[in-house]
Image (cartoon, helix red, strand yellow):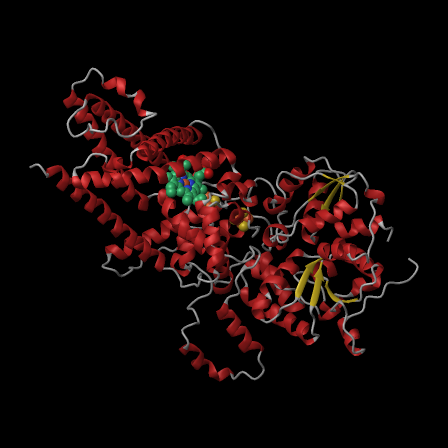
Amino acid sequence: MEYLPNILFILALAAGVGFFVINCRKLIRNIKLGRDENHSDNKPQRFKNMAKIALGQYKMVRRPVSGIIHVLVYLGFIIINIEVLEIIIDGIFGTHRIFSFLGGFYDFLIAVFEIFALLVLVGVIIFWIRRNVLHIKRFLNKELKGWPKLDANLILYFEVVLMLLFLTMNAADLSLQLRGADHYAQASGVVGSFPVSQFIVPLFENMDTASVILIERAAWWIHILGILVFLNYLYYSKHLHILLAFPNTYFARLKPQGEFDNLEAVTNEVKLMMDPDADPYAMPAEEESDEVPAKFGASEATDLSWAQLLNAYTCTECGRCTSECPAHQTGKKLSPRRIMMATRDRIEDIGKNIDANKGEFKEDGKQLLDDYITREELWACTTCNACVEACPVGINPLSIIMDMRQYLVMEQSAAPSDLNNAMTNIENNAAPWPFNQMDRANWINEI
Amino acid sequence: MAEAIKVPTMAEFMAQGKSPEVLFWVGCAGSFDDRAKKITKAFVKLLAKAGVEFAVLGTEESCTGDPAKRAGNEFLFQMQAVTNIEVLNGYEVKKIVTACPHCFNTIANEYPGLGGTYEVLHHTQFLKSLISEGRLTVEGGKYKGKRITFHDPCYLARANRIYEAPRDLLAKLEVELVEMKRCKTNGFCCGAGGAQMFKEPEPGNKDVNIERTEQALETKPDIIAAGCPFCNTMMTDGIKNKEKESEIEVLDIAEMIAAAEDL
Ligand code: HEM
Ligand code: SF4
Ligand code: SF4
């Protein structure tokens, strides 16, 4: 029986990590449902972007209030995770504060963890107030109704509870060390330095040692189990960004924002059409190369590239894109954040469908276009790139809008009629207006 | 005007066995739209004044395909691109200047992948280099001390990170530059991009150009400076909508320089 806690801990850890691995696999599988696309060029620049935008939080601080608070929460999270390593080792071996041999440095570390825990607590409470009390426009859009709003708050509650447990655990531990309780007290005196939780210690003064041990153990257990639960919550939440922000910024586009990719399949066909020597009957040979896609543009989430699907899973639903979007600001239905959320919803539904049907997608009568993203949204975009510029995690909502427009125009000829007129003009007289090409240079005689 | 300005075509240069220093890509707006033609003419006058040997394609120029591409019609875009590239490569064009950021972006970024690689400059960049080479001199003149706000074209500033050249030119005109809250890479679209110029806006509570005009009006400008024929149209319409056309002008930077030089 002596080793029961150790065994239970190892089982809980294995379950927590095991489910997490399963979720990660599902995530990777879903992302790979996207079209293949090469994002492996120019690695030094990619690393630089990741270091600057994700690690360095470079774009976050463009909005100073939420940016700086986020930096605190983010740093706190990373730093406090060093302590989780000690908690895991203690849990497996039944030790008490295994790193305490580091002496003065250990005291310093624990002190830093505690201060960050307090800062995270304050930061998260401010986040909560911003979301629920202050009327900040980007948190009020209709796409956040329901689950997204609950999700945002759940994350904050999680963090509050975890930080409180961490500090309670430390306070009870300090109280026990001060009493010289077995297992807790060490010959060298008090290990760790507790600048924050020392203020909680007086609460335990009148309790007997057994009760304080109970509190310490309970806080310890709930804290580490909470972390394991949180780890598995990520997949269902916008909080997935804490992991995916890194690969997403690494794989983000490096080209100028104004440069839209040229569709290779179209290039091949255009070349064939323009080449006077091309043999029109040579078409069958063309079909042998698997480069020609079944369709142009995207009507379904799986027509998008894996990088676009990674974008969708990375989205923090912060709405910085939407708050900069000229279409959205003038009351149009388009919200680039919603484009990302809808894409994630669709690829998730496809993934669930595949899981439910033994690894094979069964037609569900739905698609990304119309059922998740409407044409009205797609046609409201000015391709201004403000959303791309605003996104602090390197997401490109515009590329999805463009791929879906391509489907509408090239596969369905479903452009708004004015646009069709402009395109017919370009085709017939080389300008979007109905002017005669021969009049193009008339201005010269007007100087 | 003392002397009529000659605008030679590439074909004429070719016939003489010569090639110009730079090709002026006029663009559809600059060729056909009455407002934009004024920008074209102002720019040509500046080129002539600086003694630049330039040429245009004339009737051999066609739409770059930008509106088709941003509307989603990649076929039409590439047909246009390949046609234009054939013409440009046929004349062995090396350097292109254009007063349209959409043409600029398309030729500079999207043509190379289709076989057309050129040095492409926005007219504000080219004018700046003419000034720094001493070929063109600019003094404040009639714009000295005027309150001016500059509307960044999306496809110049955010899309291609060019926002200093137009501002440097405004500085040469000795104006008082007042920035809008949203400027440079955070600029706010005029509402014309993405082929919106050629369609009715989707339902909403305001037109994008009205919103942008209001942002510009907040700076209480005497003049709104622009660097794109489409932005120019959008902002001009916005000013008319606000019934401010008697107080506030919308001018391309090339027009301002030409006017300051009494051209
Ligand atoms: C690794 C640990 C991280 C933690 C613990 C963390 C934590 C959080 C939390 C709690 C929120 C919710 C804020 C709210 O409710 O308003 C949030 C939002 C956000 N996070 Fe993180 N994050 C982490 C990493 C990152 C990284 C690497 C980035 C990339 C720059 C990032 C970008 C964002 C963004 C853009 C938001 C939306 C914030 C806003 O409303 O402006 N996060 N994060
Ligand atoms: S590119 Fe489109 S979606 Fe993005 S901000 Fe501009 S108008 Fe909005
Ligand atoms: S796309 Fe980027 S800016 Fe927009 S909500 Fe998602 S994370 Fe925020």
Q: Residue furthest top?
A: A206
Name the side, left or right, on which A353 lies relative to B38.
left
**Percent of width and height locating residue A165:** 27, 29
Q: Residue furthest front?
A: A188
Q: Residue visible at 62% across and 70% down?
A: B116
**Percent of width and height locating residue A228:** 25, 41
Vertical relation: A322 (above or below) A110: below
Q: Residue furthest left?
A: A1
Q: Residue visible at 62% across and 59% down?
A: B105
Q: Is residue A269 visible?
A: yes
Name the side, left or right, on which A324 lies relative to A128.
right
Name the side, left or right, on which A283 lies relative to B14.
left
**Percent of width and height locating residue A249:** 45, 51
> How many discs mark residues in the rendered view?
0
Q: Is residue B251 visible?
A: no
**Percent of width and height locating residue B179:** 67, 39
Q: Residue visible at 54% across and 58% down?
A: A255
Q: Residue visible at 77% across and 76% down?
A: B14
Where on the picture, by quarter, is residue B224? Answer: top right
Q: Residue furthest right?
A: B2
In the depicted view, which residue is nearer to us: B188 or A177? A177
Q: Quadrant of the N terminus of chain B?
A: bottom right
Where on the picture, by quarter, is residue A174? Answer: top left
